[in-house]
Every structure is written in structure tokens, then in C-alpha cells.
Amino acid sequence: MTRPSLHRWSRRQILASGAGLALSLGFPRRVLAGSASRNLIIWWNNGGWDPTFVFDPHFEANGLARDPNSTLASAGGISFADAESRPAVRAYFERWGHRSCVINGLSVGSISHDGCSRLVLTGVRVGGADLGTLVASQSLGSRPLPFVSLGGPRYPGQQGEVLTPVGPLLSGFVQDTEPAHADIDATREELLLEYIQREAELRTNQPYLDSWSQAVERLRVLRQQPDLLNIGANPTEEELISMGIELLATQTCSVLGLQAPLPSLVRWDSHDQNQENQEQAFESSFSHLDTLLTTLATTEDGDGTLLDHTTVLVLSEMGRTPRLNPSMGKDHWPYTSAMVVGAGVGGGRVVGVSNETLVGQKVDFSSGASSSSGSTLFPQNLVAGVLQSFDIDPGGPLPGVAPFTAWQD
């Protein structure tokens, strides 16, 4: 299959020269000249976790069904439920508690997986772009793939050009090695590329043509560094994390979506056998999260490390009921916890409050402390706070929503 001729540079050549992305798209050399930029990683835990197993144990509440083998512990300034069956959780807080902020009492207002996922990520129940897309839209002109999704739900809204789900098809397309089942006509593709380039030169201020033209240029840049998207049909969790870190390090993307991996037959959605599922799910998620943060913290980025310039949001769409059901499981619950780590985070703190039945209480949005004059914490408040921390006016996508800023440094 013959494709348009594209000179390919190694990543080292691109980074050393400051060319490639910056020059191909006509943006300043500083984009690839080692200057640090703010990144976002969304670490998604799909299915709805039980906050009592780690974040919000309420040991003072006698009627709450929690891990009977856990005890209250503290590390890095954060109190959490500790258990011998979850050594990775303890190790995580010992290493990263000082850079983490736990958020409790988050009211998702639903017990639908899809509905909660959309609300947690977008701040709205219908339509709207998700947090990753909104943050990544700032780097649309300076990253070939502003928002790379390697896992987790995604809601790009009307900004689909910002989001790229990475898989074998895209990898093959960039490397000219499409899977056998891919129906791609190279001659037709070349004609389309030529047509878009010609029309873009003849017509100005045409939004759709401008968008397509930018997409063509981003494709050219990606084909100059094809190894960045070298992904197999069944990549391991470690390979996905490694790829994501490299995409951030090379400033190929600014936002990364990852789904926390689970062992076989283990699930967050623990309608039965809550104990077994939750303890293994938390252990797996925190073990891989520790790997992610360790890699971020040991990867140089400008005047620091990637962790110094990356905010990591650790999320699940809902919580679990305070009590067990007849199957020794827990059903859906409209209150949950979250965690924020890294750049811009005031670490070593737990903010937000729930009561002994895991119902979120009113809090002061600047301190996160319980307050009778405060407000209930909803996902839209958290989304607005994250947007604000990235210097994005939350009033655009979320008019009238007060930002929750207690997690910020």
C-alpha cells in the first residue's frame, strides 16, 4: 500500500531540534523545547467503589458495613482504612499521601452507571464536553493528539477533534501497517489530503476546513514519530501506562485517560461478595496508580518532573450502600469519594464530609470543612474547580456553578 511520502524523524531528533510538531503546525518552538506545560490524567475506576474500604471508613459508626479486618491508619497526612490484604494502598499513602488530597461526600445524585459517569466527568446530565476534552482544547493547536484516551468513558460533546481513542487501528494507520480487516484506500486518502490542502489554501476563515487542515498536519507529525503509537491488539496495563507517559513526555498530548486495571473476575460493581471484590479492586488500582506516579516522578520535564506538572484525578462514578444486601454485596449509592494528586494539589489532606450513613454534608468550598452555611458538593463543583485550576473559566460550560477549590494548593 503506497501512502503520501512523509519523512520520519526519531523522537530524539524531534525533541533535540525543536521541530516536528512546533514547526509543522506553525507554533512556537517552546512547545517542544523542554518547557513544562500543565497536564491532566484521569484515572478511572469503572463500576462504583466502596469508599469505606479506603477513603471514608467511619470507624465511629456502628451500623456501617465496612471491611471488618481494617483499622484506622494515617500516612502522608491522610487518614485511611488500612488492612493487611491491601499493602499497596498503605504503600501508596506512605509514598504519595503528602501529594494527595482525598475528597469525601461527593453527591452524584444518581445510581445509574452511565448517568453518574457523565455527570462526574462533564458536570451536566445531558450533552456537554467532559473535563478531559475541555482541558485538552487549550492545547489543540500545540499537540497532535490533545486528549488521548487509553481507557475510561469519554464525552467530547461538540469537540470531537480534541479526543483520540488510541488502539490498534490508529496505531496501524500512523505506521502504515493497518490491521488486515481495515478498509483503507491509500489512493483515495492521498486525493483527500491533497483536496483539503488545496481548499485550505484557497479559502480562509472556514471553520470546518481549518479543522480538517489542522488534522492533516497533526497526522503528518504523528507519522514522523510512529513508534509513539506502537500498541498491540492486547496491550498489558503496564504497556498502556508506559505509552501514556511517553505521549505526555514528548508533548504529543496534554490530557490522558486511563482505566484502572482489575484482576480477572474482580469488579468494582460488587452487588455480591463486596468484601472480596472491593479489597482486590482497591489493591490493584492503587498498585498500578503507584506505578503511574513513580514513572511521572522519575521522568524529567522542563524544570522538574512530569508529576510536578501533571494533575491526576482518581475517580469512580458512584459509591456503594452503607449496608450489605442478602448476597453479601453492596448496591449503588449516590455518594462517593475522589482523590486528586500532583500539580496544583494541596497534599496531605482529606476534605469534604459525609455522615455515618455516607450521605454528603454541606461544606465550605474553599476549605472543605463541614459548614452549616456551606453547600452540598456535587460533581459540577469539582469539575468547575479543576477547570479553574487550569485557567479555564468554568462559567462557559458550567454557568453559575461555584468551583470547589479546597483541594488546591
Image: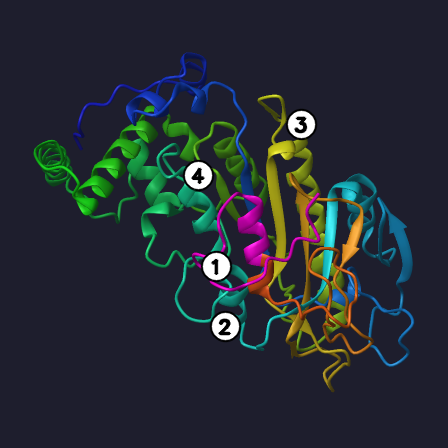
Q: Residue at x 77, y 66 (%)?
A: 353
Disc 3 residue type (three-letter): Thr
Disc 4 residue type (three-letter): Ile
The residue lying toward the viewer, choosing from 123 and 162, is: 123
| Label 4: few (<14), some (14–19) or many (≥20) C-alpha neighbours in 10 Å | some
Disc 2 residue type (three-letter): Gly
Per the model, the C-alpha gap separating discs 3 and 1 is 28 Å
Q: Residue at x 49, y 43 (%)?
A: 255
Residue 196 is situated, as x and y percent measured from the top left of the image, at 13, 38
Per the model, the C-alpha gap separating discs 3 and 2 is 37 Å
Asked if the residue under mark 2 is in contact with the one under mark 3, i.e. CB atoms within 8 Å, the reply is: no
1 vs 4, front mark = 1
Q: Residue at x 52, y 31 (%)?
A: 37
Q: Tell which residue pokes out farthest to the bottom in this image.
A: 326
Q: Which residue is mark 3?
A: 298
Quarter of the image for residue 232 reads top left
Quarter of the image for residue 178 reads top left
Q: Which residue is mark 2?
A: 115
Q: Is 391 contained in the magenta span?
A: yes
2 vs 4, front mark = 2
Q: Which element carries disc 1, helix, strand or loop?
A: loop
What is the span of residues highlighted in magenta in the rendered image? 383-409
* Magenta span main SS: loop
Q: Which residue is mark 4?
A: 231
Say whether disc 3 or disc 1 marks the residue closer to the N-terminus. Answer: 1
Q: Is 386 contained in the magenta span?
A: yes
Taking the image as drawn, is residue 176 in sight?
no
